[in-house]
């Protein structure tokens, strides 16, 4: 009986230590890293407006091009071109581009013919677009994205100077009804909070192809996507992970700089997309893998230890106070981030999503591992 009590007391002490340590680490992440975006001052710099090449890769997205491309082609910017790479489309993309090019003189397009025996990923299309670009400064978005402002190019590219080669922007999703839409948008918001904050901390690790800018010379100096050309995804995050530094990377979060696109409508479609994104994370620099895995790992142990301590009724007032402290810090930072990135109606869902998200990502990571093992065996 005595030994059982000692064992319980020891277990409780261990849980208390886990709770205290994970709380401390969580506060370091929020106050030491994520708060950088909160205190970031949007630049009012008015650098010279360099000529810009906007590059968009499109595969079977004729409808999206008709709907969204005009927002890019009607920007209030003195000198820019829009290059659309028709990546082996089998729909009406070619006809749509030919028709639009007559209406919009800034539009140029090139086509990668469809070949059943020749399969390739988006990186080839991006490379083709970059080679076709006439200008040094490149701005990327997707065919299903639209610019939220006619000053999108101006807002993103005002950050370029002699030392700045990379601009990280925000590509959000449109707000729609339903829990899935809110979860997708919260996931996108939180990822943006991370990559913006890490860039401000001097350690950029990714960007998103929906809204990203960099110099053409930087691409060719680093041999483009050569080191990961065999991986389906990673034309945005793996490239930035390789070439981004404290000195050559800036962020742009002004409302005028945002792009939007329609999110997936089904859980299955979004899971497939998330799984593809998670496959690139294992190729990040070691320090980024440690930092990015550390936050969700300590978050999981924080919540589990909190529940266990409540069950054992151990110092409930202190345990609850510590939980409330983290929650207040989290809500303040998320609220300001939500306002900055113009995401509505997400704060109320932040706590349940915050709990679910790391378990969800772990499940997808395990699924990726199992599937990759099966493919190797087959």
Image (cartoon, rainbow, N blue to C red):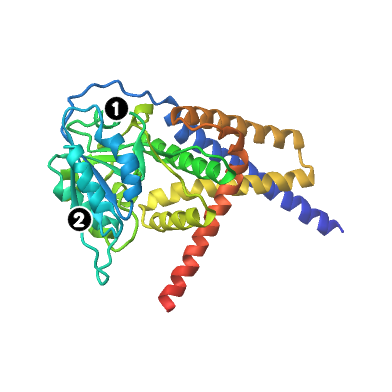
Q: Position of residue 108 (x, y in %)?
A: 17, 44
Q: Measure the alpha-carbon separation of dots 2 and 1.
A: 28 Å
Report the front residue among 88 and 11. Answer: 88
Residue displayed at 17% across by 37% down: 106
Instruction: Specify whether residue 203 is in view.
Output: no
Q: Given contact means CB atoms under 8 Å apart, are the residues at marks 2 and 1 in contact?
A: no
Image quadrant assignment for residue 256: top left
As displayed, is residue 155 above or below residue 368? Answer: above
Measuring from the top left, give residue 3's x and y in whole percent: 82, 59
Secondary structure state at the residue bearing disc 2: strand
Q: Which residue is mark 2?
A: 111
Q: Tag 1's secondary structure?
A: loop
Mark 1 is surrounded, within 10 Å at the Cα level, by few (under 14), some (14 to 19) or many (20 or more) other residues, namely some
The image position of residue 112, as x and y in percent, is 21, 58
Query: If you read the primary sequence from the N terminus, does the residue marked by circle 2 or circle 1 appear first?
Result: 2
- Residue 1 vs residue 351: left or right? right
What is the quadrant of the N terminus in the image? Answer: bottom right
Residue 36 shows which numbered tag? none
Figure quadrant of the C terminus: bottom left
- Residue 60 image-quadrant placement: bottom left
Tell me, yes or no, if residue 155 can be seen here: yes
User: Residue lying furthest bottom in this view?
Assistant: 378
Is 5 displayed left or right of 300 in the figure? right
Of badges 2 and 1, nearer the viewer stands 2
- For the point 20% across and 49% down, the residue is 129
Q: 1 left or right of 54?
A: right
Q: Please name the residue that numbered disc 1 is placed on.
A: 151
């Amino acid at each position: 009986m005595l030994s059982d009590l000692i064992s319980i007391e020891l277990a409780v002490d261990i849980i208390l230590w886990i709770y205290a340590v994970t709380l401390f680490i969580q506060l370091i992440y929020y106050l030491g890293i994520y708060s950088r975006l909160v205190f970031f001052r949007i630049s009012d710099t008015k650098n010279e407006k360099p000529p810009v090449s906007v590059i968009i890769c499109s595969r079977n997205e004729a409808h999206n091009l008709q709907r969204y491309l005009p927002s890019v082609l009607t920007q209030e910017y003195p000198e820019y071109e829009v290059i659309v790479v028709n990546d082996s489309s089998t729909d009406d993309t070619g006809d749509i581009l030919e028709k639009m090019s007559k209406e919009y003189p800034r539009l140029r397009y090139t086509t990668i013919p469809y070949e059943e025996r020749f399969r390739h990923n988006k990186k080839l299309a991006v490379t083709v677009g970059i080679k076709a670009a006439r200008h040094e400064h490149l701005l990327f978005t997707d065919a299903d994205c639209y610019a939220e402002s006619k000053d999108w190019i101006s807002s993103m590219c005002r950050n370029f100077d002699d030392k700045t080669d990379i601009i990280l922007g925000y590509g959000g999703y449109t707000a729609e009804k339903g829990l899935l839409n809110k979860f997708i948008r919260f996931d996108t918001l939180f990822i943006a909070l991370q990559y913006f904050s890490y860039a401000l901390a001097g350690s950029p690790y990714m960007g998103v192809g929906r809204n990203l800018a960099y110099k053409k010379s930087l691409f060719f100096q680093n041999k483009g996507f050569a080191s990961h050309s065999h991986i389906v995804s990673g034309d945005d995050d793996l490239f930035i992970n390789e070439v981004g530094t404290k000195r050559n990377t800036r962020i742009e979060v002004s409302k005028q700089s945002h792009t939007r696109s329609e999110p997936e409508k089904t859980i299955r479609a979004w899971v497939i997309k998330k799984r593809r994104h998670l496959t690139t994370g294992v190729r990040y620099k070691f320090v980024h893998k440690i930092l990015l895995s550390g936050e969700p790992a300590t978050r999981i142990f924080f919540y589990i230890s909190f529940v266990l301590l409540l069950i054992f009724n151990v110092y409930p007032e202190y345990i609850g106070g510590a939980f409330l402290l983290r929650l207040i810090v989290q809500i303040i930072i998320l609220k300001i981030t939500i306002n900055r990135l113009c995401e509505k109606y997400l704060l109320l869902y932040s706590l349940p999503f915050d709990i679910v998200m790391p378990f969800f990502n772990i499940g997808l990571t395990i699924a990726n591992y199992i599937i990759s093992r099966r493919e190797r065996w087959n």
